[in-house]
Image: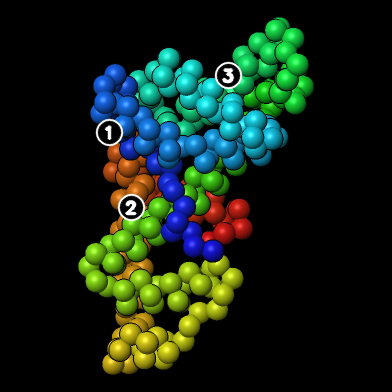
Amino acid sequence: MDASNTSFPSTAWSLITKAGVPNDEGRRALEEVLTRYLPVLQTYLKRVHRIHPQEAEDLLQSFLADNFLKNELVTKADRTQGRFRSLLITSLDRFLVSRVRYDYAQKRDRRLNVNVENAFDVQGREPEAKDIIEIEWARATVAETLRRMRLECEVSNRQDVWGIFNARLLSSIFGGTATPYSALSVEYGLTSPNQAANLLITAKRMFARSLRAVIAEYVPDQSSVEEEITELRNILRNAGGE
């Protein structure tokens, strides 16, 4: 498994602001925002509301058209008033309630396969929904951090840093075994296993720096970064990941 290929649904607040402007730049920003958030919303519909994947995709297209393009949901986002993903989920739940009621009122042959009285009880589903969204967010945060770290290593021609990080840490996390430092020192033409160990320290520092940069994109201010890192660790630990 290569987690670095996973897209990150981060709240790039400059994009959110641009997306509310009705011009070509706004449309491009909106497209990027939606691309980032669609995977998390799809997971939410399938796992929380138990909606078939194809129907979930159709619902999301309607939701995005109604809420982003018509109601300008993005213009209501305020980074000082809470997380953008929370605003999205609340709006999606409300859209689903309205959609179910409309379908039943119109007596359509093709209805959502749900119980209109209970399926979209937002309060009743809140703990489960929150857990799923937070876990998906946390995993995607790490994945985006890895993607950026790998890109930085490629641009700076430090494949040895990424290679040792991948061989010592990522491979074991994703079910493999850590490569011995002695083998890594030979593979990357290093003078000793100790040099390989020192490069792993460099890699860990690079990862920590990238993680802080990613988190800084969606927290209200820099003082919240460390708090978010602690929360991220707790979410992944409780979900069975490190």
Q: Horizontal placement of 229 versus 19: left or right?
A: right
Of the numbered discs 3 and 2, the one sitting upstream in the chain is 3
Looking at the image, is mark 2 or mark 1 nearer the viewer? 1
Question: Given the image, on which type of amino acid does mark 3 rest?
Answer: Arg
Depth check: give the residue in front, 63 or 201. 63
Task: Locate residue 47, reporting x and y percent.
Answer: 66, 39
Q: Position of residue 114 (x, y in %)?
A: 75, 25
> Residue at image x 48%, y 83%?
179
Q: Identify the amino acid type marked 2.
A: Arg
Question: In the image, what residue occupies the spot 36% across and 68% down?
Answer: 204
Q: Circle 3 sits on which residue?
A: 94
Q: Pointers 2 and 1 in contact (CB under 8 A)?
A: no
* Secondary structure of the residue carrying numbered label 1: helix
Dot label at residue 14: 1
**Residue 192 is at least partly visible in this image:** yes
Residue 67, disc? none
Q: Nearer the viewer, residue 59 or 128?
A: 59
Q: Position of residue 50 (x, y in %)?
A: 70, 35
Mark 3 and 2 residues: CB-CB less than 8 Å, in contact?
Answer: no
Q: Residue at label 2?
A: 212
